[in-house]
Amino acid sequence: MFIFNHQLRVRYGDTDQMGYVYYGNYPYYYEQARAEAIRSLGFSYKQLEAVGIIMPVTRMNIKYIKPALYDDLLTIRTIIPSLPNRIIIFQYEILNPQNELINQGENHLIFVEAKTGKIKSAPELLVNSLKLYF
Amino acid sequence: MFIFNHQLRVRYGDTDQMGYVYYGNYPYYYEQARAEAIRSLGFSYKQLEAVGIIMPVTRMNIKYIKPALYDDLLTIRTIIPSLPNRIIIFQYEILNPQNELINQGENHLIFVEAKTGKIKSAPELLVNSLKLYF
Amino acid sequence: MFIFNHQLRVRYGDTDQMGYVYYGNYPYYYEQARAEAIRSLGFSYKQLEAVGIIMPVTRMNIKYIKPALYDDLLTIRTIIPSLPNRIIIFQYEILNPQNELINQGENHLIFVEAKTGKIKSAPELLVNSLKLYF
Amino acid sequence: MFIFNHQLRVRYGDTDQMGYVYYGNYPYYYEQARAEAIRSLGFSYKQLEAVGIIMPVTRMNIKYIKPALYDDLLTIRTIIPSLPNRIIIFQYEILNPQNELINQGENHLIFVEAKTGKIKSAPELLVNSLKLYF
């Protein structure tokens, strides 16, 4: 299992008139967290795109437990629970500054050759860098 | 079962560099669609807030089937599959201009008294206006 | 002078915890309004891109006069004050449901050949369709 | 003159199908930068709101010079050019990873008592913390 923690701060523009982070901002938070998780492996999502692989999201599940608030410094724990093959799964747990679990989510992403639109297996570079953790 | 169709057009700012609608924009589309679905019942989400009820989202599931593209006029079908009680469920089906199903989603929302933070049952106004459909 | 009115409804996700439309959402509203203004001329921004022209924004000025509120049906008046040459200017006036002027803005956009990155003059198609108004 | 540098990373969701950061995301970047600029003075915008002061934006000017790209680590220089009175002015200069100036902007914000809606002068706390720099 691969785990990575990333911190980010809630922007004013992320809140809504309830005074909570709007529910549509969590996918953005997840994206930031998984980009940093991949970077911690020694390369970047940008590099994957540069070699012609795009990674569209095919599934998302979110459980909203407690609201996040303006200016909260959130901790997003990204978990890759299994070695990717045709699909890579990212799970997320968000903790607020009081260390309470406020949000849980999951994404499935696939690997697509940008030129042809064909679904591919996970790039070796990514699989190899994750093997250490499994 | 209650069903309502709403149309909206994809904005340039909704796309990402893959040329697709960014996966984080669908929750915004769902919100627009369910606000119009409620309006079609003869009142508005705004009016519910005006009498002190807020409706935070507690769950979201999304299945991304095909990409939506810039300037697409999308049809969002909102379904309320059962009479709300402590929870109201909204299901969504998004069709592209070629009438293909490109996205499916679901939200759970709860009813909270804004002043006290207490979870309530669905307001009678909402339940009564939906009873016709069940 | 070319003038076009477009209506759009404020989304919940557009508000912030002040209860106002967040100041960063107005550029999105402007984009929607100018896309519809162009469409009213008989073609679309999407078609311009399809023939290899992209139109990056080079300037924006905004004057925030009064807040826009959740669920407001806003009227956005888009004005093209002069025939485009190397630059096209769009001006915007936003009216709230009480018909008050709440926001004024302006954008400059240029015409760039997507392949080469070269700055071009306004496409003839666009200039010709606007000539009627000047 | 008060100057503060803040770094942030461009998210995938911030790009559009041109492959550039969408022009409507810069106000969000400005907000992040000025929040951190205020924090560097020893308090936070959140604390100002907690004592009943909200700070709506009344003006924005942006000059888009070069595109920002996905995953760029941007440096945003926030400048407060003069002591605030009825208005506080923030100026921004954004540098890309190649240290090129890609964007310049300015915001005017006012001070409003949340309860009454009355326009106020800048809170003493803010003015005093800035006096050192002028």
Image (cartoon, coloured by chain):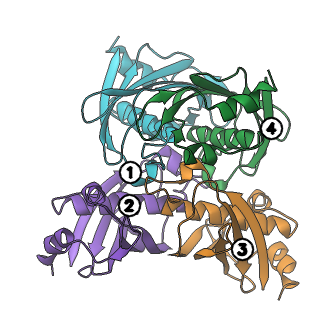
Chain colours: A orange, B purple, C cyan, D green
* Crowd class of label 3 (few under 14; some 14 to 19; many from 20; radius 10 Å): many
Q: Mark 1 lies on which chain?
A: C
**Helix, strand or loop for disc 1:** loop
Q: Do the residues labelled 2 and 1 touch (CB within 8 Å)?
A: yes
Q: Is mark 4 on a helix, strand or loop?
A: strand
- Which chain is home to disc 2? B
Residues beneath discs 4 and 2 located on the same chain: no
- The residue under the point 63% across, 70% down is A118
Distance from label 3 to label 2 (Cα)? 27 Å
Residues at circles 3 and 1 in contact by the CB criterion of under 8 Å: no
Residue type for callout 2: Glu
> In whole angstroms, how far apart are the C-alphas of marks 3 and 1?
30 Å
Amino acid type, callout 4: Asn
Q: Are marks 3 and 2 on the same chain?
A: no
Label 4 CA crowd tier, 10 Å (few <14, some 14–19, many 20+): some
Which quadrant: the N terminus of chain C? Answer: top left
Query: Where does label 1 land, which residue?
Result: C11
In the displayed image of the protein, which residue is found farthest to the top? C134
Give residue D5's mark: 4
Say which residue label 3 marks.
A77
Where is D30 relative to C61, above or below?
A: below
